[in-house]
Image (tube, rainbow, N blue to C red):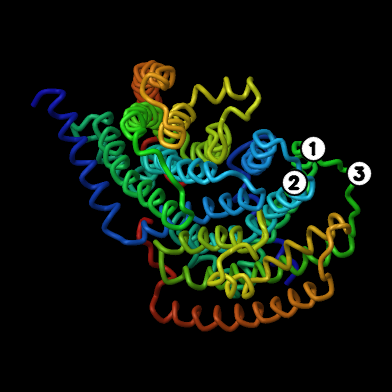
């Protein structure tokens, strides 16, 4: 099984990167997150410049959110986009299905590379962002153990969510990319990335509570700077429980959708979308 | 049939398909209004967290609406030739007597119309959801700046389309790289004046930066046509330059792609 996982992850890496030379690929994957960081960092800078008010806490909150969103954003895209790409763009889904019959494991392996890239981007953009907004790096007190545990939990629930999205997109060529992009945008909005999710209107709170993103983001902030106080045990427990539920739901949902999609013959269906 | 009649008939035919096809499926509401609104909402809440004045909300909403045009230029215009190649339509376009410029003009007009409906929806949602307020007296100057921006932007889109024609998958990646840097440089969520002077200089060669700034100044700050004269002059100067460049690049890439046999090359 490990050889299979390695082979699929390696294929995923080649598919991502073999269109150019390594140096150009590195520049390519760095440019977008760096400019995204600049885009959002300047929200803080614009406010600070026009009002004259500085808030290191707000600066840390926004930069840590934007930087580490790369991990989740890149990961969910990596898992959820596979179905659309392989069926519509390259028309490979049916062949992959024959070569690697466990599609869930295949999706999780395809996504792994995206998480690694997302993590590297997070680690690179975080100090750059903090320097940009004038936050002293010496103020950081990192809890590495918690950070690692949190990243593993994040990989698990986010992959499960990606598999649910991928299962839905098995039925639709057109809506597949919309669903995966929307999910990324939704996580950004309700996940306490740029602002505390408590600020959102009440009718959005059930969604905030249903997705483990807020817990993941707050735990990441605490792991990066232990002076950022939260209820660590409560959030960790809540995230772990939600992760377990997500994994069970993703497994069951994907199995049933997989069966249905084979019955309907959608694995080979292409619509030029 | 004269050269210009053929050009405009091809443009009308392509624009018709784009408008008809773009509105056939209601999914565009999610894709082009709901998704940008998620991002706009996040930034509005971030400004509220910081305690920013209410003018910033109008800035953000207008930025969210105007960036739709940039995405349309990249993906609706630039990437279309790549997509037509992948689906086999490009060969048909090439052997037909319709000029490629006519097809691109049609894509631009159709895309502009579709995106206008999406952009207006974002503004309306911004007003309803976040209470964004605009200065109605600034409508006329804003409209003038908007029209000039559109012509300049879509002329730039024609050049991007020719890159796709030649470089396919690498062109696709290059177009992805045009998203965030342009969003940052154009001052999507903040006034461009907060950027360092050197970056402002670089940003000012992008029509979206000048257009967005002019529209914001008129609709949020109430500037008139005279106060926006520099924006109008800059955009007016950009248009002939970008159109000339688009025509030259398109012709060059078309000849090169034909010579290297890239017009029918797929999945590359």
Q: CA distance from mark 1 to mark 2?
A: 8 Å
Name the secondary structure under disc 3.
Answer: helix
> Would residue A262 be visible to someone looking at this image?
yes
For residue A56, above or below residue B102: below
Q: On screen, B261 above or below A85?
A: above
At label 2, counting other C-alpha atoms closer than 10 Å, the crowd grade (few under 14, some 14-19, many 20 or more) is many
Residue B14 x/y as whole percent: 23, 41
Q: Residues within 10 Å of mark 1 (few under 14, many from 20)?
A: some
Q: Dot 3, crowdedness within 10 Å: few (<14), some or many (≥20)?
A: few
Q: CA distance from mark 3 to mark 2?
A: 15 Å
Q: Quadrant of residue A183?
A: bottom right
Q: Give the chain letter at badge 1.
A: A
Which is in the foreground here, disc 3 or disc 2?
A: 2
Going by the image, does B83 lie left or right of A208? left
Q: Residue at x 56, y 62 (%)?
A: A186
Which chain letter goes with mark 2? A
- In the rendered image, the quadrant that contains the N terminus of chain B is top left
Q: Which mark is residue A134?
A: 1
Q: Are marks 1 and 2 in contact (CB under 8 Å)?
A: yes
Mark 3, residue position: A138
Q: CA distance from mark 3 to mark 1?
A: 12 Å
Q: Are marks 3 and 2 on the same chain?
A: yes
x and y, in percent, of residue B185 in the image: 56, 31
3 or 2: tag closer to the N-terminus: 2
Counting every numbered tag in the picture gives 3
Q: Are marks 3 and 1 in contact (CB under 8 Å)?
A: no
Question: B160 or B88, which is in the foreground?
Answer: B160
Which chain's residue wears label 3? A
How far from the left and from the top, in percent, is residue B248?
Answer: 36, 19
Residue at label 2?
A59
- Foreground pick, A197 / A82: A197
Helix, strand or loop at mark 1: loop
């Amino acid at each position: 099984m490990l050889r299979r996982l390695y082979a699929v992850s390696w294929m995923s890496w080649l598919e991502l990167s073999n269109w150019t030379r390594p140096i150009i690929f590195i520049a390519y994957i760095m440019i977008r997150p760096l400019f995204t960081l600049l885009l959002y960092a300047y929200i803080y800078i614009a406010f600070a410049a026009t009002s004259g008010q500085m808030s290191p806490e707000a600066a840390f909150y926004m930069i840590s959110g934007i930087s580490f969103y790369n991990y989740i954003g890149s990961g969910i895209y990596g898992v959820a986009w596979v179905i659309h790409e392989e069926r519509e763009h390259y028309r490979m889904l049916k062949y992959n299905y024959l070569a690697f019959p466990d599609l869930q494991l295949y999706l999780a392996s395809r996504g792994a590379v995206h998480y690694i890239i997302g993590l590297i981007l997070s680690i690179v953009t975080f100090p750059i962002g903090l320097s940009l907004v004038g936050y002293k790096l010496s103020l950081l007190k990192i809890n590495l153990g918690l950070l690692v545990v949190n990243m593993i939990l994040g990989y698990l629930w986010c992959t499960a969510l990606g598999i649910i999205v991928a299962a839905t997109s098995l039925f639709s060529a057109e809506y597949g990319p919309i669903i995966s992009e929307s999910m990324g945008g939704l996580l950004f909005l309700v996940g306490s990335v740029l602002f505390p999710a408590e600020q959102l209107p009440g009718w959005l709170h059930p969604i905030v509570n249903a997705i483990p993103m807020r817990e993941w983001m707050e735990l990441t902030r605490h792991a990066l700077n232990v002076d950022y106080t939260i209820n660590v045990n409560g959030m960790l427990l809540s995230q772990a429980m939600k992760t377990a539920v997500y994994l069970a739901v993703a497994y069951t949902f994907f199995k049933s959708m997989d069966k249905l999609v084979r019955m309907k013959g959608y694995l080979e269906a292409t619509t030029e979308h | 049939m004269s050269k210009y009649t053929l050009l405009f008939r091809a443009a009308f035919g392509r624009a018709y398909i784009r408008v008809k096809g773009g509105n056939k499926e209601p999914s565009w509401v999610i894709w082009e209004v709901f998704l940008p609104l998620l991002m706009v909402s996040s930034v509005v809440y971030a400004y509220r967290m910081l305690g920013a004045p209410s003018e910033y909300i109008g800035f953000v909403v207008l930025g969210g609406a105007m960036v739709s045009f940039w995405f349309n230029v990249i993906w609706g215009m630039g990437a279309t030739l790549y997509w037509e190649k992948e689906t086999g339509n490009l060969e048909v376009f090439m052997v037909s007597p319709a000029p490629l410029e006519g097809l691109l003009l049609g894509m631009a007009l159709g895309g502009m119309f579709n995106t206008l409906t999406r952009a207006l929806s974002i503004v309306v949602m911004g007003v309803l959801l976040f209470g964004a307020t605009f200065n109605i007296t600034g409508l006329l100057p804003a409209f003038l700046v908007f029209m000039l921006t559109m012509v300049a932007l879509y002329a730039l889109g024609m050049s991007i389309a020719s890159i796709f024609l030649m470089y396919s998958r690498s062109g696709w990646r290059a177009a992805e790289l045009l998203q965030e840097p342009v969003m940052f440089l154009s001052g999507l969520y903040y006034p461009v004046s907060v950027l360092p002077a050197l970056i402002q200089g670089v940003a000012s060669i992008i029509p979206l930066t000048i257009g967005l700034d002019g529209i914001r100044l008129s609709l949020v700050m109430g500037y008139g046509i005279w106060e926006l004269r520099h924006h109008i002059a800059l955009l007016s100067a950009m248009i002939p330059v970008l159109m000339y460049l688009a025509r030259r690049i398109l012709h060059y890439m078309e000849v090169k792609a034909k010579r290297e046999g890239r017009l029918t090359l797929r999945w590359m």
